Amino acid sequence: MPGRWRRPGSGVTADGARALAVRRGVRVAVAAGAGFYPLLYAADRPVAALYALFAPVALGLLSAVPGSGRQKATVMLCALPPALALASLGTLLAVDTWAAVGGMLVVGFVLAFAAVAGPRPAGAGPGLQLFYILACFPPYAPGTLGDRLVGLTAGVLLLVACETLLLPERAAPSYRHRMAEALRTAAEEAASPGRVPPATLRAAGERLRPSTLP
């Protein structure tokens, strides 16, 4: 039946996934618009406006940062200094194609290796890489670096505010809670074999997989 499908181990129905995507899109759209239009029309800074528009899209839409609204906001705040550094590096290395390519290889390796820090830092990786890529695009314009950093900072801070205040995601159950639920289910099955449906047992085990944790 429509809306009843669940992704294995996630406990999220198709309807729930759609609602999640809608809330996420609203937050990104509000953050992007709130940064883009004032910088473009009020401040007359088109480069800053572009980066203020791109930052929420890169971190909020093209990066899969798991967790509650506050957890996401914390990750995005922590990602701001590396994002500024990568945008600066991309701007400077854009002077030469091979320099930009070499920088891309190093940045890609470092961000891929950073995934060992957990799912939230790994989730921010694609957005951080995109900040470097955007800054590498021609023309070579180191004089616009200040505007780029201003726009990027504004976009990230607006996204942080939206993640915290606008339709924030609820906190997912902790691993300790999931483990307790799984042990309770296992105890019920051990006390009375056949009492717990096999699908429930499988779901309890799947929820303990690290890939399903925020």
Image: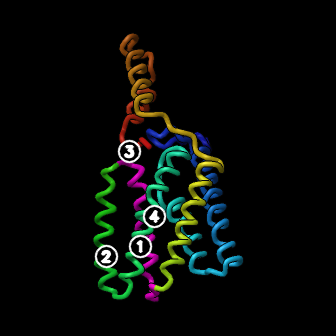
- Quadrant of the snapshot with the C terminus: top left
Q: Secondary structure at mark 1?
A: helix
Numbered mark located on residue 103 in the image: 2
Colour logic: rainbow
Q: Nearer the viewer, residue 101 or 197?
A: 101
From the image, tell me which residue sits under label 3: 211
In magenta, the rendered stretch is 118-142
Please tell me whether residue 116 belongs to the stretch shown in magenta.
Answer: no
**Secondary structure of the residue carrying numbered label 4:** helix
Residue 132 is labelled as 1
Q: Tell me which residue sits at (38%, 10%) in the image.
A: 191
Q: Is residue 134 magenta?
A: yes
In the picture, measured across the screen, residue 183 lies left or right of residue 18, that is left
Q: Nearer the viewer, residue 180 or 111?
A: 111
Label 2 is placed on what type of residue?
Gly
Type of amino acid at the residue the image marks with label 4: Gly
Determine whether the residue tagged by mark 3 lies in a helix, strand or loop. helix
The amino acid sitting under disc 1 is: Tyr
- Residue displayed at 38% across by 31% down: 205
Distance of mark 3 from mark 1, alpha carbons? Answer: 27 Å
